[in-house]
Amino acid sequence: MSSAAVADDEQWGRRRLVLTVAGMALAVVLLLAGLGYAVYSALSSTGPASATPTKGQQIQAAEQLPAGAARRDAIAAAAMLSVPPEASRPGKPSPKVGAGIAIPSATTVGPARVPSGFPHTPEGAIGQLAAIEATVLQSMSIERAHEVHAAWSTPGAVAAEDWELTGNIQAFLASGAGQYAGDLHTAVVTTPVGAQVKGADGADWVLACVLLDVKAQIATQARIAYGHCERMQWSPLDGGRWLIGPGPAPARAPSTWPGTDLAIEAGWKTVTPTTDQ
């Protein structure tokens, strides 16, 4: 090969490398924007929380109601702390130590290949919700979201096309980052970092909330925090498992970066895994 040809190959190699690196950088920017847009869409799809009555007052009022649908609806509708979308980004750690909550681990794989086997406890409901969220969000597939919803929801639950998790995936895919959703080098990983029980109605119904650390990676990493709540109802069928219960979607959970003052104020407890069942 002539020296001129070698020089041309080297120049093309450098240009290709520059374009590849630039493309990866753009992918990361788009990925971060896509994740942020998904959270922003979730936060902005409902109006601002009312200043009065307060969250605590609403929950206290709901807990005074007799067991049944009215109590469950009141717990679900009670407003949670209203936070701006930027609260989901990494923030200044709080000097305070927040409360912790031990979440059990899955012991089997259930319908639609979702981890299952969580105990009949409020913490078990949180664990099952986290497993459902992880399965859906890590797929970044609307079809997969529908499959999981069909296997893990009761009649009367929010429809799959109106489900918050489906909406998040739709927003992500509609953003510039959507073009990377099927890339083999793209990975979305969710880790539960916070949780809270917003309310309960007996042993078989829990309003469970999970705060996720959502990481997306294309050569480098983008991260956000995402809070999500569901009505979780125990079903004795198939050996017993927690399902998404009937009724309108709960009030939006605050998406706050874990360990910040705002996360503590929002009521998030730090998740600590446990093997005790």
Image (cartoon, helix red, strand yellow):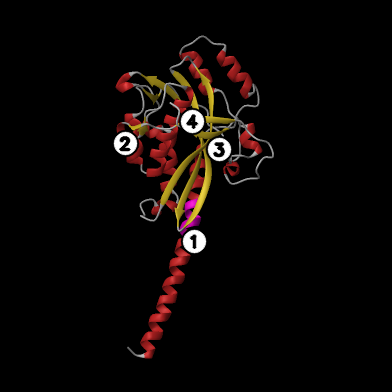
Q: Nearer the viewer, mark 4 or mark 1?
A: 4
Numbered label attached to residue 229: none
Which is nearer the eye, 35 or 193? 193
Name the residue at 37% across, 44% down. Answer: 139
Q: Quadrant of residue 263?
A: top right
Query: Please, which residue is most extreme toward the front here?
Result: 276
The residue segment tinted magenta is 27-32
Name the residue at 49% across, 14% down. Answer: 70
Q: Distance between the residues labelled 4 and 3?
A: 19 Å
Mark 1: which amino acid? Ala
Instruction: Confirm or deny contact between disc 1 and disc 3 (CB under 8 A).
Output: no
Mark 4: which amino acid? Ile
Which quadrant: the N terminus? Answer: bottom left
Q: Position of residue 33 (x, y in %)?
A: 51, 51
- Of mark 3 and mark 2, the one earlier in the sequence is 2
Within the magenta stretch, is there residue 19? no
Numbered label attached to residue 255: 3
- Of mark 1 and mark 3, the one earlier in the sequence is 1
- Of mark 1 and mark 2, the one earlier in the sequence is 1
Name the residue at 49% across, 61% down. Answer: 25
Numbered label attached to residue 113: 2
Left or right? Give the position of 195 relative to 134: right
Numbered label attached to residue 103: 4
- Of mark 4 and mark 1, the one earlier in the sequence is 1
Mark 2: which amino acid? Arg
Q: Distance between the residues labelled 2 and 4?
A: 20 Å
Helix, strand or loop for disc 2:
helix
Which is nearer the eye, 149 or 53? 149
Helix, strand or loop for disc 3:
loop
Q: Which of marks 2 and 4 is in front?
A: 4
- How packed is label 3: few (under 14 Cα within 10 Å), some, or many (20 or more)? many
